[in-house]
Amino acid sequence: MRNFEKPGRSPVYAAQAAVATSHPLATLTAIETLRGGGNAVDAGIAALAVQCVVDPLMTGIGGDCFALYVPKGASVPVALNGSGRSPAAATDAWYLENGVAITPTSPHAVTVPGAIAAWDRLVADHGSRSLGDLLQPAIRYAEEGFPVQPRVAWDWARSVERIGWDPAAAATYLPGGRAPEAGQRIRHERLGATLRRIAAQGPRGFYEGPVAADIVARLRELGGLHTLEDFAQAAPEIVTPIATRYRGYDVYECPPAGQGLAALMMLNVLEPHDVAGLSDLDRVHLFAEACKQAYHHRDALFADPGLHDVPVAHLLSDAWRASAHGAIDMARAREPVIYPEIAREAAHRDTVYLSVVDRDGNALSLINSLFQGFGTGIMAPESGVLLHNRGLSFRIEPGHPNTIAPRKRPMHTIIPGMLMRDGRAVAPFGVMGGHYQAMGHVELLTGLLDRGLDVQEALDAPRSFAYGGEVEMEGGFTEAVIQGMAARGHRTVRAPLPIGGGQVIWIDHAAGTLAAGSDPRKDGSALGY
């Protein structure tokens, strides 16, 4: 239990339903939807749509979406891959022949946005209301305006350059030529009109007709390879989730091209260790070494499984765990083994994640992202759709599993999680933060299952991330731990920004209660009733 004389948050306990999101207006929308008779999917989509309006750095309808959903009575989650594909004309040979790179603000970083198609599929399969009904709160915020929250304003001010280069985006998101301050009210009428079109026409209102034409025209104006046919063929995919067992619980993730597999690999490596009995220094060192092993394999092997054979079974096998575990020395940092070093950008990208459990026990783990803050910064001028830059995860490297190719999904960082036991959902959970997310799942779950932290304490705990040749450490770690890591051979740096965010709802079946937590690194909240 936390010290009530110090600043902090308590878990939110509820008897019937609970919600946790990273934005207060999204949380309120979800609660209102639940209290109005909607189920977990209804509440999640309504809240997510609102967040696409009020938190435009982190997410948008021009991004991608993944979900894990456990309907009441189901023993395995439904997994939805709502990520988009590259244009049919995108080949690595074209990029090499034309000397074109995929940069953060490039049209080539834009794959066909998958979010709207994913929302529609999830609502059609498991919701109790229409998508059009669920979009109404988001439409109101877009047309009538919303107050900017403090963390959103802070991030917005750091992203002026990204959003300022595109005239349409700057006109919308930099009123008066500057980022809005906390409390300032913002409207986005063009986005509101696009949401109205989607509400009336469904996904066709986004992937066909004027909205698609507007997006494609802007991308092609900038040199993109996208076509209307690429957009018309957009479709989410129901996939088979993957899982491992940790401390008696089943941890479920979406399969590659997402990086959830890396989280399961790390948990397998940690299983033989008494994580609860380790000092802070030993725990952070162990996490760093396990992280390097898993991410090394991620960067070498994870890709679109429709086009490449990702060796999931091998990477979750006892043989791989033994190999990775044997490569860890608790006294010193070591280089990851098997695959050569692949340098990758170690940035904590921008995403929103939310958890919902409804009165019937349905549990939803839902995530949506533009990747970097404001994505590419490219806005389709008539429809107001801001476009993501998920294609940055592609390589232009013939022969590599993740090289760009026609109608291919890139390796994806956003990953919802679901914890289950004895065939019942125990906790929908997720941690935002781009590449950090797999490590974030590990830190959150070990906090809950090894260290005995409650849901809020597990989210509050200081974070570290070993990637790109260094270990970023948040300010909650003492100087002694940082120096101890350096003495073991790690190149340590203080994290320049808070690492990620997160939400989780714990379902206590014996007590008949829910405990919800929301990350203090964001503006959001947990609520229940």
Image (cartoon, helix red, strand yellow):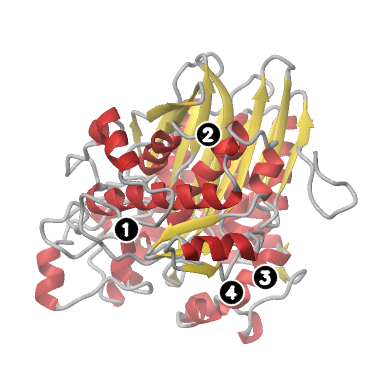
Nearer to me, 285 or 363: 285
Seen at 56% across and 63% down, the residue is 482
Q: Position of residue 471 (x, y in %)?
A: 47, 62
- 258 left or right of 341 in image: right
Residue located beneath label 1 in the image: 111
- 17 left or right of 495 in image: right
Q: In this view, does 15 lie above or below 284?
A: above
Alpha carbon of mark 2 to alpha carbon of mark 4: how far?
49 Å
Q: Which sits earlier in the primary sequence, circle 1 or circle 3?
A: 1
**In the image, what residue type sits under mark 4?**
Tyr
Label 2 crowding class (10 Å Cα cut-off): few <14, some 14-19, many 20+?
Answer: few
Q: Which sits earlier in the primary sequence, circle 2 or circle 4?
A: 4
**Mark toward the viewer: 1 or 2:** 2
Seen at 30% across and 34% down, the residue is 322
Alpha carbon of mark 3 to alpha carbon of mark 4: how far?
11 Å
Seen at 71% across and 51% down, the residue is 25
Residue located beneath label 2 in the image: 274
Residue located beneath label 4 in the image: 173
Nearer to me, 361 or 113: 361
Q: Do the residues labelled 1 and 3 touch (CB within 8 Å)?
A: no
Hey, which residue is sitting farthest bottom in the picture? 177
In which quadrant is the C terminus drawn?
top right
Label 1 crowding class (10 Å Cα cut-off): few <14, some 14-19, many 20+?
Answer: many
Q: Is mark 4 on a helix, strand or loop?
A: helix
Residue located beneath label 3 in the image: 153
